[in-house]
Amino acid sequence: MAALVLFVFLDALCYPLITLGLQSAPHLTFAFLRALIAGCALGLLVLVLKRPIPRGAGVWLRLGGIGLGTTSLGFAGMFHASEFVAPGMATIISHTQPFVAAILAFFFLRERLAPLQLFGLVVAFSGVVVVSIPQLSAGGTIAFAAGLVYLAVATLGVAAGNILTKSLGAKVDPLVGTAAQLLIGSIPLGIATAIEGHSTAIDWTPKFVAALLGLALLGSALARSLWFSILETVPLSQANAFTFLSPFIAVVLGVMFFSESISFATAAGLVLTTVGVVFVEHGPRSRYTK
């Protein structure tokens, strides 16, 4: 439970840090640097701690799939979508990922949600919708449609990456698995950055460096390592329910550091989401199969 709460906090920390960093660097360049620095930092830690390197083509194929899904598609989709879609709509669409993952988990991991837990997911998601209503974009433009496509790609990539992560179980050390997925996932991002031609258009201000290191070391290296270890023992759908709390922690951080205010919609959404997460966590666990 403590690891899940810490993961959600670190995940929520990414929202304000991405906002700060995008003022100084192109989207793909920022995403590439985040993945590369996080992967290199963990890779160095793996060497220092002499963690076991996994063997077998099947394991590395799955690690490659996690990297392409969670890191390459996840980062690229979300960073690019911010150009076209309002934060509220982006929050709603990105938080359909637990539903997509639950469907994939049913078919590929044989995880089955009890009715009460499925109801909890719906209630938790409705809380995210409520808090996002004031920020919704009117949409209806080609740019908005492009943003939706980017978000869909990111959501599917992360959901598929979570399925592959869960399928590995305890076969891979969390630090090794996370370093591998970040380094592998950074390769397509680096290629796309080079093709885009804006890799040097960075304003290396102290604010950007702080945002980049915070995202890379806390939001990626530490957070993804925690997630990797969490999925060794916790059903994916149950762990995913906690991610609905990320937008609300981001709101609290916004109040503390960006002088934002908490509206009635935010408070109501937080109540709904908390109730939904409680349903998911305390539903009958006998409905999960392995």
Image: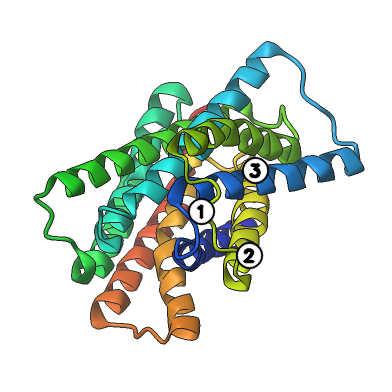
Q: Residue furthest left?
A: 140
Q: Secondary structure at mark 3?
A: helix
The residue under label 3 is which amino acid type? Leu
- Residue 166 seen by the camera: no
Find the distance from the CA under tag 1 to the CA under tag 2: 14 Å
The residue indicated by pointer 1 is: 201
Q: Secondary structure at mark 2?
A: helix
The residue under label 1 is which amino acid type? Ala
- Decide which of 203, 116 is in the foreground and name it: 203
Residue 108 position, x and y percent, is 45, 22
The residue indicated by pointer 3 is: 36
Mark 1, mark 3: which one is toward the viewer?
1
N-terminal-most mark, 1 or 3: 3
Residue 212 position, x and y percent, is 60, 59
- Decide which of 284, 198 is in the foreground and name it: 198
Residue 235 position, x and y percent, is 52, 40
N-terminal-most mark, 1 or 2: 1
N-terminal-most mark, 2 or 3: 3
Residues under numbered marks 2 and 3 in contact, where contact means CB atoms less than 8 Å apart: no
Instruction: State the residue at coordinates (52%, 65%).
Output: 17
Q: What's the mark number on residue 209? A: 2
Find the distance from the CA under tag 2 to the CA under tag 3: 14 Å
Residues under numbered marks 1 and 3 in contact, where contact means CB atoms less than 8 Å apart: no
The residue under label 2 is which amino acid type? Val
Residue 170 falls left or right of residue 30: right
Residue 42 falls left or right of residue 113: right
Residue 138 position, x and y percent, is 11, 60
